[in-house]
Image (tube, grey):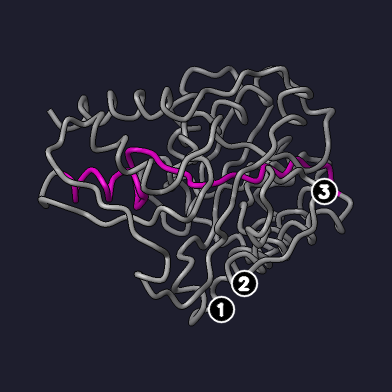
Amino acid sequence: MKVLVTGGLGQLGREISKLTASSEHTYIYTDVRADGDVVRLDITDSAAVGALVQDVDVIVNCAAYTDVNKAESDADAAYKVNALAPAVLAEAAKAAGAMLIHVSTDYVFDGESNVPYTEDAPKNPLGVYGRTKLAGENAIIASGCRHLIFRTSWLYSNSGKNFFLTMAELTASKPEVKVVEDQVGTPTYAYDLAYLITYIIEENLLDRNGVYNYSGEGVCSWYDFATEICSQLGHICCVIPCRTEDYPSPVKRPHYSVLDKTKVKADFGLEIPYWRQSLAMAVKEYFSLNK
């Protein structure tokens, strides 16, 4: 089997690369710039995408415009990566008869619920980022290509820019940090989501189709997450809870982002790690990388 992975230099792409290093299948990694074994590909260029995927069996789209705040003033760029590119990949996948595995977000919901969101819950994104990600989902579904869309939340790892690494740096260098306590969801370790995706490919579970939720198990606030990061890293720092209004933002963020994972667990038969367990794995890797 031949697999094309976009966003190969991002958090999720890097984790998939590590997990598939000894795979018997052929994995090709692309990004907006070439780097080592990662090939340059503009995924908004239909001709370039079509030429590369014509003999591919699976496309995994890990590429995304994820700067939620900047998206408000850079809507065109967010739209190209989050909506146009998935449409291009979907049409190429359909033409090649390939499966498209796409990563979306909890930001397609408005956060007004008080129970975990199921896949078919009403969508009502609050900002440009969420709207463009939802447009990407809709384009994939409308294309008629074979697809698996995984909505995830609060993704973190030991690479790139994410909350875990930000808190690791701040709690190591400052006596106190303020973190919002009135936004609730579930952290997702990029390794865990990468494992699900590679498991589906390696076990050839490609007969499924549709939208799935995937995040860590359990519920916490950003304050809870920051406190646990500080504790597990052994840092001496006072993490202080605050309210969302204490940090003015150009976009309203969902106050409740908990995803119901009943469907993904039933269809793929995998247990989802509790978020503190996964954080412990990330911390262990963090220490090994920062000896």
Residue 60 falls within the magenta-colored stretch: no
CA neighbours of label 2 inside 10 A, class few (<14), some (14 to 19), many (20+): many
Callout 1: SS: helix
Image quadrant where one finds the N terminus: top right
Which residue is located at x 58 percent, y 65 percent?
A: 81
Query: Could you tell which of marks 3 and 2 lies nearer the N-terminus?
Result: 2
Q: Nearer the viewer, residue 196 or 57?
A: 196
Up the image or down, 239 lies above or below 130; here it is: above
CA neighbours of label 1 inside 10 A, class few (<14), some (14 to 19), many (20+): some
Apparent side of residue 141 relative to residue 108 in the rendered image (left or right): right
Where residue 62 appears, as percent x and y from the top left, is 56, 47
Residue beneath disc 1? 75
Apparent side of residue 46 relative to residue 6 in the rendered image (left or right): right
Looking at the image, do the residues carrying marks 2 and 1 touch, with CB atoms under 8 Å apart? Answer: yes
Query: Could you tell which of marks 3 and 1 lies nearer the N-terminus?
Result: 1
Up the image or down, 217 lies above or below 259; here it is: above
Residue range highlighted in magenta: 145-171
Q: Nearer the viewer, residue 1 or 182?
A: 182
Identify residue type, mark 3: Asp
Identify residue type, mark 2: Tyr
Callout 2: SS: helix
Residue 120 badge: 3
Spatial separation of the CA atoms under disc 2 and disc 1: 6 Å
Where residue 254 appears, as percent x and y from the top left, is 57, 60
Where residue 38 appears, as percent x and y from the top left, is 44, 44
Residue 161 falls within the magenta-colored stretch: yes
Looking at the image, do the residues carrying marks 3 and 2 touch, with CB atoms under 8 Å apart? Answer: no
